Amino acid sequence: MPQYLHANPKREITRGTLDAFWNSHAEEWVKFLFIYLYHTGARISEALAVKAEDFDTITRDGEKFVLIYSLTLKNPSTHERTLHISLDEPYMAELVGYSKFVKEGRLFKVSRQWAWVKLQEVIPWVTPHGFRHNRLNQFAQDGETAFALKSWAGWSSVAPSDSYTQSVDTLKMAQRRRKREKI
């Protein structure tokens, strides 16, 4: 069985990983691709198809959000094709600025293979699909149901989402056990 990200905490993409990548010597477009993949969990081909006009910002209840329209991704809570990501999330404001700089057309004008190579030049253990696993794991930790994960990921069955929800259940049980041992 493959070592999926949710089963291997050493391969989790954390805020520290994000900061390290942002401060690396990578080209600007690679950094923005990394940020996009981290926050959306999109497949590499979906990320490379994103256009500058797919980005918008709104203010709701005093908080600013980035709206990203995607034909394939769905917000698990609303099942809409627009993702709402807080502008306060790490490096999202910079990504929006980059989308405005590009103005029109695709944000990332490279092939899948070239994007993969450039990402792995900086952090070799990160794969583009690892971002997807990371995002699904975060959704599961936030309490999303197996059906919401299925909808977001575009799976035809809930079976793949079981591994994410079960790993979260196992994590919660371990945390409760540690708390009991401290008392």
Image (tube, rainbow, N blue to C red):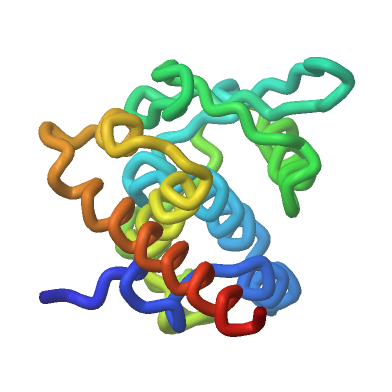
Q: Tally the marks.
A: 0
**In the displayed image of the protein, which residue is found farthest to the front?**
183
Q: Which of the 4 quarters of the picture holds residue 26?
A: bottom right
Residue situated in front as seen by the camera: 63 or 24: 63
Residue at x-position 59% and y-position 29%: 52
Q: Position of residue 61 (x, y in %)?
A: 83, 16
Do we see residue 181 in this rendering?
yes
Counting from the top left corner in percent of width and height, residue 142 is at 52, 45
Q: Residue at x 36, y 40 (%)?
A: 46
Residue 15 image point, x, y percent: 67, 66
**Residue drawn where x is 40% and y is 19% of the image:** 79
From the viewer's perspective, is residue 25 above or below residue 91?
A: below
Reply above or below: 48 against 27: above
Residue toward you, 96 or 63: 63
**Nearest the eye: 137 or 131:** 137
Q: In the image, is residue 87 above or below residue 70?
A: below
x and y, in percent, of residue 101 in the image:
74, 36
Residue 114: tell me if it is visible: no
153, 31: nearer the viewer: 153
Residue lying farthest right? 62
Q: Is residue 161 left or right of residue 125?
A: left
Name the quarter where the N terminus is drawn: bottom left
From the image, which quarter does the C terminus lie in?
bottom right
Q: Residue at x 62, y 53 (%)?
A: 32
